């Protein structure tokens, strides 16, 4: 995969999870700084005919917030790099900015800078900077439950509709990802490993498998349409069996559906899905 090949060209202990973890010392406590960055490009991740300008910038922000959440990080700042055509009016630019401001207001962080350039298409890069007292990585342990939040498969269906009819349902998760921060922040102390489902459930399972040197015993069958549906931005996570009841209670309290789908075991796992990138 070209994406993985490119990432491997950079040798750093901070690369490999949804965000980089840096250690900083505070006077009263030791906490970890988390930095996560994502790109959102026209005709790669979206078409202008599918989204309004505010929806584009809002989703670009949520996509990166998803990485912060699964790292169990609270965002403090954001840096934006935005390219857009000179044909955009001042009102258009205001609408584009409003999506960034909406996300910042909802998730409590401050936009502190970045860069803008002229381009023939809209291209966005968002970098969030935050902190965590207990970052969650992708490394699972043997004999743990494997679960995911919400439902899978609707994004792939809506993408097919968009490609065929150039229209997306108003409440589609492809348009507005449903982030599970309320559940995850409360459940994080009982969770071992996690990642967001950006490239499809099976692909994320493969990533955890490779990092953890583990395979899975499946308790439920997930069909290919659901397992290969990308940009779901639900959370895949593992946890010790002893924490089952408390995880269930947190899911009820936060009204977050969870599905326990497998148990980690010795072995490996390979995704059967086509690559979403390149």
Image (cartoon, rainbow, N blue to C red):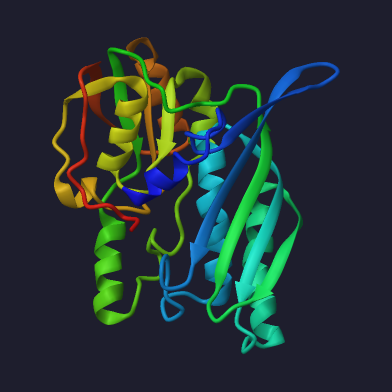
Name the residue at the right extreme. Answer: 27
Is residue 118 visible to us here? yes
The C terminus - image quarter: bottom left
Q: Position of residue 75 (x, y in %)?
A: 67, 41
Residue at position x 42%, y 70% from top?
46
In this view, 24 is above or below 51 = above
| Residue 241 as seen in the image, left or right of residue 102 | left
Q: Position of residue 219 (x, y in %)?
A: 16, 26
Front-most of residues 278 and 11 = 11
Front-most of residues 177 and 82 = 82
Q: Position of residue 102 (x, y in %)?
A: 65, 61
Residue at position x 63%, y 50% from top?
127
In this view, 16 is above or below 36 = above
Is residue 258 visible to us here? no
Q: Position of residue 72 (x, y in %)?
A: 56, 31
Residue at position x 27%, y 20% from top?
214
Residue at position x 61%, y 77% from top?
84
State how many labels appear: 0
Name the residue at the front extreme. Answer: 9
In this view, 62 is above or below 92 = above
| Residue 11 as seen in the image, left or right of residue 229 | right
């Amino acid at each position: 995969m070209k994406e993985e090949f490119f990432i491997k060209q950079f040798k750093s202990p901070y690369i490999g999870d949804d965000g980089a973890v840096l250690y900083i010392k505070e006077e009263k406590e030791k906490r970890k700084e988390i930095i996560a960055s994502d790109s959102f490009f026209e005709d790669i991740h979206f078409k202008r005919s599918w989204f309004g300008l505010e929806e584009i910038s809002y989703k670009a922000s949520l996509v990166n917030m998803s990485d912060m959440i699964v790292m169990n990080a609270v965002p403090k700042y954001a840096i934006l790099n935005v390219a857009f055509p000179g044909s955009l009016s001042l009102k258009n630019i205001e609408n584009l900015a409003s999506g960034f401001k909406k996300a910042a207001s909802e998730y409590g962080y401050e936009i502190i800078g970045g860069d803008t350039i002229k381009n023939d298409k809209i291209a966005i890069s968002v970098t969030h900077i935050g902190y965590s007292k207990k970052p969650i990585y992708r490394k699972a342990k043997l004999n743990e439950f494997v679960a995911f939040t919400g439902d899978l498969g609707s994004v792939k269906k809506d993408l097919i509709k968009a490609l065929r009819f150039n229209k997306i349902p108003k409440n589609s998760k492809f348009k507005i990802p449903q982030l599970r921060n309320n559940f995850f922040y409360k459940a994080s102390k009982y969770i071992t490993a996690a990642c967001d489902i950006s490239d499809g459930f099976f692909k994320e399972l493969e990533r955890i498998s490779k990092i953890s040197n583990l395979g899975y015993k499946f308790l439920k069958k997930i069909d290919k349409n659901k397992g290969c549906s990308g940009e779901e931005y639900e959370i895949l996570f593992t946890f010790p069996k002893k924490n089952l009841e408390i995880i269930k209670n947190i899911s009820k309290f936060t009204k977050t559906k969870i599905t326990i789908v497998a148990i980690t075991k010795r072995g490996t796992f390979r995704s059967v899905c086509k690559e979403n990138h390149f």
